[in-house]
Image: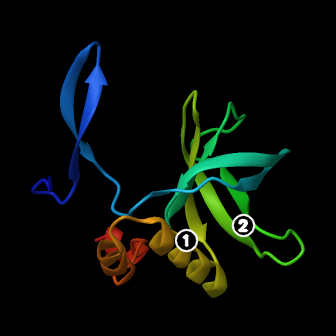
């Protein structure tokens, strides 16, 4: 269900009750399990496992020593032959940390990485037409527009 503000409606359990809560994600997430490395100031976390990913971010499983707002470099190891398979390197920011893991927003990536992420999402989604439409619109807000 699409709410008037463009958010999708979701159901959240709270103290034994379910209530509708807006889903703020504007990009399709797909289940995608692979290994990632995360580098932050003072820490290098290796061989972590992902739960899902979009072309705007990734959820990394585990109890992680990360804090919301913390900048990081994410290296995604794509499945396959280690010597032939590319690694995707992205700059990110931790946006949420839970008992299950951490959500990281991607802030920047090179064009090849963007194309790899696009293909991963397209090949793993149940609605490729929706994903194609998402890729036709910017995933990141223009800072100059946000200030107006």
- Please name the residue that numbered disc 1 is placed on: 120
The C terminus is located in which quarter? bottom left
Label 2: few (<14), some or many (≥20) within 10 Å? some
User: Which one is earlier in the sequence, the residue at label 1 or at label 2?
Assistant: 2
Q: Secondary structure at mark 2?
A: loop
Q: Residue 51: percent from the left, percent from the top?
A: 57, 47
User: In the depicted view, which residue is nearer to us: 120 or 107?
Assistant: 120
Q: Residue 13: percent from the left, percent from the top?
A: 29, 24
In the shown orientation, is residue 29 left or right of residue 61? Answer: left
In the shown orientation, is residue 19 left or right of residue 68? Answer: left
In the shown orientation, is residue 61 left or right of residue 54? Answer: right
Kindly identify the residue that appears in the image at 79 percent across and 75 percent down. 85
**How many numbered discs?**
2
- Please name the residue that numbered disc 2 is placed on: 78
In the shown orientation, is residue 64 left or right of residue 103? Answer: right
Kindly identify the residue that appears in the image at 63 percent across and 53 percent down. 33
User: In the depicted view, which residue is nearer to us: 125 or 12?
Assistant: 125
Q: Is residue 142 above or below residue 14?
A: below
Q: Secondary structure at mark 1?
A: helix
Kindly identify the residue that appears in the image at 77 percent across and 68 percent down. 80
């Amino acid at each position: 269900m699409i709410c008037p503000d463009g958010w999708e409606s979701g159901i959240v359990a709270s103290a034994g009750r379910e209530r509708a809560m807006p889903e703020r994600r504007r990009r399709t997430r797909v289940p995608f399990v692979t290994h990632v490395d995360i580098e932050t100031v003072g820490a290098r976390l290796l061989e972590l496992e992902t739960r899902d990913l979009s072309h705007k971010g990734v959820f990394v499983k585990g109890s992680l020593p990360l804090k919301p707002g913390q900048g990081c470099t994410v290296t995604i190891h794509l499945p396959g032959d280690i010597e032939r398979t590319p690694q995707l390197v992205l700059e990110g920011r931790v946006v949420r940390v839970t008992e299950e893991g951490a959500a990281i927003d991607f802030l920047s990536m090179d064009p090849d990485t963007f194309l790899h992420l696009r293909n991963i999402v397209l090949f793993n989604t149940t609605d490729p037409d929706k994903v194609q439409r998402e890729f036709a619109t910017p995933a990141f807000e223009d800072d100059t527009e946000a200030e107006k």
